[in-house]
Image (cartoon, coloured by chain):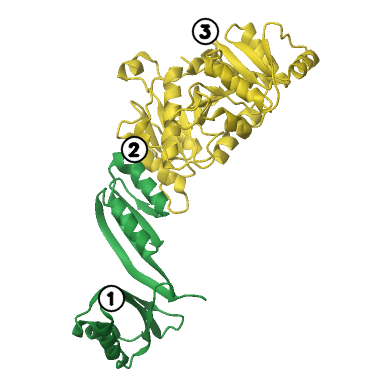
Chain colours: A yellow, B green
Amino acid sequence: MVAVSSVDYNFGDEAFMKESTGDIYDMQRLLDTVERGRRTMAVVSPYDRATLVASASALKDGIVEPILIGEERRIRESAQTYGIETSGMEIVDSKDEKIIEDACDLYNWNRVHFIMKGMVGTGYFFHIVLEPRFKIRTERILSHVGVFEIPQTKRIFLMSDAGINILPNFSRKIHIVANAVEAARWLGIGLVRVGMLAAVEKVNLPAMPATLDAFLMKKYAETGYFGACEIDGPFAFDNAVDPECAGTKGIGGKVAGQANVLIVPNIETGNAIWKSITCLQKKEAAGVVLGGACPIVVPSRSDDHLTKLASIKLACLLMG
Amino acid sequence: MKHTLSCLACNRPGVLAKIARAFSEEGINIYSLAAGETEEEDKSRIIIVVEADTQTLQRAEERLGKIRDILKLYDLREGELIAMEFLMIKIRIKPEFIPQILQTAELFNAQVIAVSDEAMVLTLAEEEKRVNGLIKMLKKFEILEMCRSGKLAVSGVD
């Protein structure tokens, strides 16, 4: 059980909100705001084409210097097979679980700013990354924040949590909301409008416990814990993102139809939305895990290089 | 000492009053009482929890034995019974206490069955000790209304 009050988040302040223009309309433009700089990233087990291409592209764009960690012979063979230039990237020869440990050690020694996962299972990856001897773990709860664009809605969305928390309880959801709101503010979204997703707009107990959490999250936001943002729910997906749908159903409020942060009730819902956007719509998307001392890029092993590169850029943006 | 009595009685008007009188005449206070139909519609099972010394309880049992509508009477001993109590409790919602209320409910496996802007209703079916524990924890918040079923019990299955 994590005591909510013991965790500090930086949600920005009113002045920050006024400076900002509101929604962000263009995913590509957002990602292109990443400035060139001397950032370094540890890439764990980069044996697949997408991870190698994304790392090389990030280096070429001058946004991050990747340090590739894994079996050197295998990394070089893969790079050769896929025709990827690795000459500008440092390679740390390592094996088995030592690969992840080496990446975390680099973070401990301030050699890298963040870590990216390559061809290794997510559960196994986090099992090692979150060991107390590494400085990545904090008192916060880790959650995945995905960013994607739905052109019809003319804005980008942040969605959480489609990747880490399986069936979060209310306390965990507070941290999931907090991580997502903080990320939205860092990305420059001025009016953060959080829609708590469920299947219906009214509390339905005991059949739909997600509706209760959504309703109570709105109440909890009255304490000001999340800073200046609007939180409302429960919402079905369409009523959260589409003003016309919300209007048709007579759902009012500042979030209905205009949400830019979507909080899903469980990982199944999040995964289904995320994959339907990235897999079926072929839309560019980016995702990172927040709540640690640094953003952690944890793409799906099947993600293409564009998604992986977008996720690297997102991590850079969220580093500040 | 607390005793849990299981009384099988005819499902007829006035039976409960006769039982209450038997305890009252011996000066025994009824701690809780739960009555309901049994597997046979014409019979009721009444679970009575009383606090009394053995002799006084014996006298009350003799009085109960004389009531024709009472078919069976058992003094269920701890360890020989499976007991549970049902609780409904309405708490005022103050936004800052929502996480603690829900964490407490989760800890005790209590269910939220209704909610409004002002209040939420929790239920719990558990052993008396855990019901007491939940109430104690929720006292930190504002309890608006509370209702306990009293102990429900059946004899053990062994």
- In 3D space, how far apart are the residues under numbered discs 1 and 2 (Cα atoms)? 43 Å
The residue wearing badge 3 is A35
The residue wearing badge 1 is B50
Mark 1 crowdedness (10 Å alpha carbons): few <14, some 14-19, many ≥20:
some
Q: Identify the subunit bearing mark 3.
A: A
- Residue flagged by tag 2: what amino acid is it? Tyr
What residue sits 43% from the left and 17% below the top?
A188
First-in-chain label (2 vs 3): 3
Residue B113, given in percent of the width and then of the height, sits at: 39, 55
- Residue flagged by tag 1: what amino acid is it? Val
Instruction: Classify residue A271 as left or right of residue B49.
Output: right
The answer to whether residue A24 shows anywhere in this view is yes
Residue A203, given in percent of the width and then of the height, sits at: 41, 48
The residue wearing badge 2 is A220
Mark 3 crowdedness (10 Å alpha carbons): few <14, some 14-19, many ≥20:
some
Query: Above or below — where is A41 with respect to A169?
Result: above
- In 3D space, how far apart are the residues under numbered discs 3 and 1 (Cα atoms)? 76 Å
Q: Quadrant of residue B12?
A: bottom left
Q: Identify the subunit bearing mark 1.
A: B
Q: Quadrant of residue B74?
A: bottom left
